[in-house]
Amino acid sequence: MAKLNERLADRLKQLRLERGLPLQELADLSGVSRSTLSRIENGDVSPTADTLSALSAAYHMTISQLLAPVEVPFQPLVRHGEQSEWQDPENGFARRVVSPPSGGLSAEVIRCTLEPYQIIAYAGPSRPGHEHHLVMLEGALTVTLGDEMHPLQAGDCLRYQLYGPSRFQTGVDPATYLMVLV
Amino acid sequence: MAKLNERLADRLKQLRLERGLPLQELADLSGVSRSTLSRIENGDVSPTADTLSALSAAYHMTISQLLAPVEVPFQPLVRHGEQSEWQDPENGFARRVVSPPSGGLSAEVIRCTLEPYQIIAYAGPSRPGHEHHLVMLEGALTVTLGDEMHPLQAGDCLRYQLYGPSRFQTGVDPATYLMVLV
DNA sequence: TCTGTTTTTCCATTATTTGAGAAAAAATCC
DNA sequence: GGATTTTTTCTCAAATAATGGAAAAACAGA
């Protein structure tokens, strides 16, 4: 965890030097004091979310873009026991993060299980335009994207980019599928 | 700037409730104390980068993914005077952020000016696979992607996804072009 | 409604981060 | 090389965040 500060420090110093800015000027731009900037860039403090926000604004970036290169690099092997799972008791919808998102990776894989006679409806995606690859493993599932219905069987693969509402519906059979999000 | 805390607070509380986690359990998972979690989720403190890192790890997310929905929403109009510009005095390479990246937008636009007889070489992209659209406005420019050379004139448009090194080179004429990054 | 339990909030203490200015270091110019 | 300017780092006080424990609130089962 201490590593993050150092990586963030390097990142921020690089950004500033690329632009040929002295600390004072960045301080004026961001509203964060010289001294604080120095300590952040030396990695001896961990900036608050507010400070990060101010800095990303000064660089005309989103916080995400500021932090993306700094994120902890991915571990290649994620054993079954390490995978986090959560479940909605209401509708028996279980999600297991098979390949958790990590810095340096642009895709993640989630294994989902939906019990019979259930409907999951989403008003819209959190990040529009995301690329989805749905691989049916077992059972049957009907996916509705916009007004297009797609009845899926084990072995089928549905690919789409999500911009509007979506709906996942099971019938007699439960459904198990893999979601690849890019 | 105070807004960020509240939005972040809501985001974090939502994440936890979605998973049906009590504060105690999240505290165990993340190593961040119950009380701190409560205050963060109430928006009365701004978590440090380290704390954010711990939380994103507990949720099996990157910090970027944690923050993406929280970022300040984009302003539709960016006037010329508000656009930030920086310049490398070494090689007369000027970049002006015409459409700065913002939460909710997946593209940004940068206006670049390169003086005659200059070479800009990049070892590799910061985020591989980024989609680039280069629109030549004035002058001439030779862009080398991998081992493919592309001589460009005003009006030309070069599109590519960047994975390896790239090179931008001017001859007698200076070059002015727009970069759309997706 | 009353317990007993779980979950959340509050409080006091400790540890960090921040800001302003002084000191040190580095760069620039004669 | 020495003086001046610029830039960075350091110091101290104030503000803010983090922790652990206690009180309050919410919840569930009788």
Image (cartoon, coloured by chain):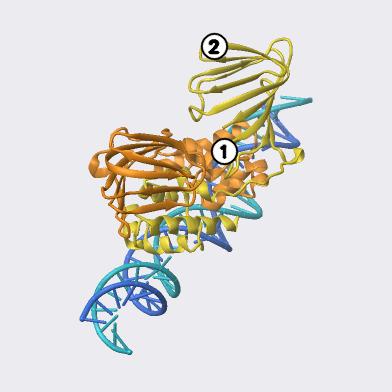
Chain colours: A yellow, B orange, C blue, D cyan
Q: Is residue A102 above or below residue A137?
A: below
Labels 1 and 2 positioned on one and the same chain: yes
Residue B46 seen in the figure: no
| Image location (x, y in percent) of residue D6 | 29, 69
Residue B169 versus residue D22: which sits nearer the camera?
B169
Sooner in the amino-acid sequence: mark 1 or mark 2: 1
| Image location (x, y in percent) of residue A1 | 60, 55
Q: Chain of mark 1?
A: A
Asked if disc 1 and disc 2 are in contact, CB closer than 8 Å, the reply is no
Residue neighbourhood size for the residue with mark 2, other residues' Cα within 10 Å, grouped as few (<14), some (14–19), many (≥20):
few
The residue lying at 28 percent from left, 45 percent from top is B175
Disc 1, SS: loop
- Find disc 1 in the rendering and name its residue: A106
| Structural distance between the alpha carbons of marks 1 and 2 | 27 Å
Q: Quadrant of residue A134?
A: top right
* Numbered tag placed on residue A148 in the rendering: 2
Q: Chain of mark 2?
A: A
Residue type beneath disc 1: Ser
Residue A85 versus residue A159: which sits nearer the camera?
A159
The residue lying at 28 percent from left, 52 percent from top is B116
Q: Quadrant of residue B24?
A: top right
- Picture mark count: 2
Residue type beneath disc 2: Glu
* Numbered tag placed on residue A3 in the rendering: none
The residue lying at 51 percent from left, 19 percent from top is A165
